[in-house]
Image (tube, helix red, strand yellow):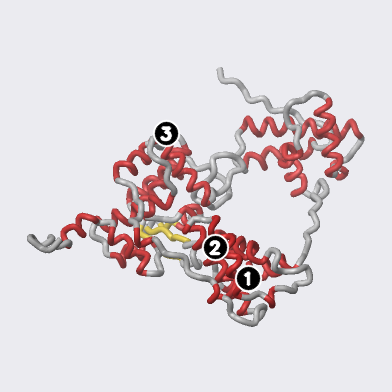
Amino acid sequence: MASRLWVPVVSGPLARYAAGYGSWLAARGYSCWAVSRRLWQLDLLSRWLEREGLSPGELTAERVGAFLAVRRVAGDSSWLSARSVALPLGYLRELGVVPAAATPAVVEDSLERILADYRRYLVDERGLTELPVARYEAAARLFLTGRVSADGSGVERLGGADVSLFLAVECPKRSVWTARRLTTGLRSLLRYLYLTGATPNPLVWAVPAVADLRDRSLPRGLEAGVVKRLLDSCDRRRTVGRRDYAVLLLLSRLGLRAGEVAAITLGDIDWRAGELLIHNGKGRRDQRLPLPADVGAAIVSYLRRRPPIEDRALFLRVIAPAGGISRRGVSAIVGTACKRAGVPVVGSHALRHTAASEMLKAGASLQEIGEVLGHQDPRTTARYAKVDRKTLRALARPWPEGGAA
């Protein structure tokens, strides 16, 4: 006979909210056991309010601290931190039962105003998404810190010497790749400052180019056998295994970026047309790609086990609270699969290179590969021409016999 799950009875002033709280937790992917534990915590909080003669509306941050202090004195070993009561307080605040959390005062200084306006420019005018905006803003903050005073002065006095000194200090700390990313962000900021009239002269000329080493090495894809080991490492008897298998197939077969996989929603799949809508993270350029049969089958297999929650993201986290996975989550799936398969850990972009290399070997043109990968610059796709070594070997002419050394 199966054991029954213990569900605590909540008493006190919070008892009327217990049923709704349990449903709220379940809708966010919490297991029955976790819901039971959280209801027990709500009961503890409710009983304490009753003993103190307090109503839910009097549950301020100070009184929450007093509740936790009482539990520590009593020798309890769980639910002792302020973070541990974030869930019940979050639910009660949504209902308007307890006071809203105090918002820390934001210091509105000139630097923050400049960065906020720059952020809006990147989003509204340039159409950039979250990741590039965060990178550009980080570069801007690094450069402007110490160069902008509290009253806003200092920007108009920026010159080429400031740019050179900044790069001379920061670039030696970085790899070629991160130095290039820093200079790209700095150029964007300097263009923005000149465009808005904050600086009287264009200073982009003061940012030197970092040596582009991309054409000196081959894009690093994975061998077909390694990709198969990654896919085989997914335990498709479990929901998480089916999810990871579908994610790895999208990366290795369509060459998607991690952020593009994370951005796929349930409405982006056109099952009748056999197409997948991809939200390109660079410039909001959406594109439709054909959905291969094996990728579609893997997605269907996952959807049969996908938790029935309101979130429209295709791929969900497996740890509550339920919701769509992030770009970092997609990269973590690749890293975990590498460890399971016993191969060197690579990033998700290695599977993107793999997809491009396989398309090239199958006879696809560079233009077709660029369209699938969403490249704007044909030179980016041209790098993969060097990957097909067998074809290049056939084009290489033999060294003339008897020629001069």
The residue under label 2 is which amino acid type? Answer: Leu
Q: Residue at x 54, y 60 (%)?
A: 171
Q: Amino acid at mark 3?
A: Arg
Front label number (2 vs 1): 1
Tell me if label 3 and label 1 are in contact, CB under 8 Å. Answer: no
Q: Nearer the viewer, mark 2 or mark 3?
A: 2
Q: Residue at x 76, y 39 (%)?
A: 82
Q: Quadrant of residue 199?
A: bottom right
For residue 17, the mark is none
**Label 3 vs label 1: CA separation?**
59 Å
Q: Position of residue 244 (x, y in %)?
A: 44, 42
- Judge by depth and name the residue closer to the eye, 170 or 403: 403
54, above or below 315, in the image: above
Q: Earlier in the sequence, mark 2 or mark 3?
A: 2
Labels in figure, total: 3
Q: Which residue is mark 1?
A: 162
| In front: label 3 or label 1 | 1
Three-letter amino acid code at disc 1? Asp
Q: Is residue 218 left or right of residue 321?
A: left
Q: Nearer the viewer, residue 235 or 183?
A: 183
Quadrant of the rendered image containing residue 337:
top left
Badge 2 is on which residue?
A: 182
Which tag, 2 or 1, sits closer to the chain's start?
A: 1
Q: Which residue is mark 3?
A: 237
Q: Residue at x 60, y 40 (%)?
A: 320
Who comes first in sequence, dot 3 or dot 1?
A: 1
